[in-house]
Image (cartoon, rainbow, N blue to C red):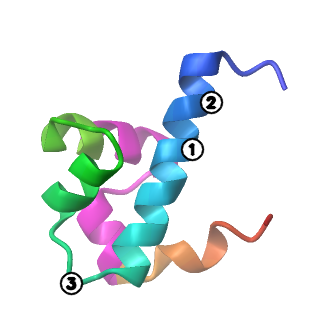
Amino acid sequence: EGVPPAEYVLQQRLQRAAKLLTKADFLPVKEVSIMCGFEDANYFAKVFRRVYGITPTEFRTTGMYASIGRGR
């Protein structure tokens, strides 16, 4: 609640990215960023880090995803 629409959409895209990073680990991070609507992989990494506290690559290699996406 109280989340601006643009921020909400961003969060949805990042959640999808988080899923793809873990389920489809054969996809390059750049490819995941494009599939989730981020043309710029650097921007994607920056936003991802702002939300999750680590880079997409770290997220993928550390298994951080276990704590995310439990709410569905």
| Element type where label 2 sits in the image | helix
Above/below status of 31 relative to 67 = above
Residue 10, image x, y percentages: 50, 34
- Closer to the chain start, of discs 3 and 2, is 2
Q: Which residue is mark 2?
A: 8
Task: Count residues near mark 1 (Cα–Cα under 10 Å), then give few for <14, some for 14-19, many for 20+.
Answer: few
Is 68 left, or right, of 34 in this rendering?
right
Q: Quadrant of the N terminus?
A: top right
- Closer to the chain start, of discs 3 and 1, is 1
Q: Amino acid at mark 2?
A: Tyr
Is 24 left, or right, of 63 in this rendering?
left
Q: Amino acid at mark 1?
A: Gln
- Seen at 42% across and 82% down, the residue is 23
Residue 28 lies in quadrant: bottom left
Between 27 and 56, the one lying in front of the other is: 27
Residue 49, image x, y percentages: 37, 46
User: Which span is picked out in magenta?
Assistant: 46-61
Q: Residue furthest right?
A: 1
| Element type where label 3 sits in the image | loop
Q: Which residue is mark 3?
A: 26
* Count of numbered labels shown in the rendering: 3
Marks 1 and 2, Cα distance to the nearest angstrom?
6 Å
Residue 12, which numbered label? 1
Q: Amino acid at mark 3?
A: Phe
Above/below status of 30 relative to 5 = below
Residue 35, image x, y percentages: 29, 53
- Seen at 64% across and 73% down, the residue is 67
Q: Quadrant of the C terminus?
A: bottom right
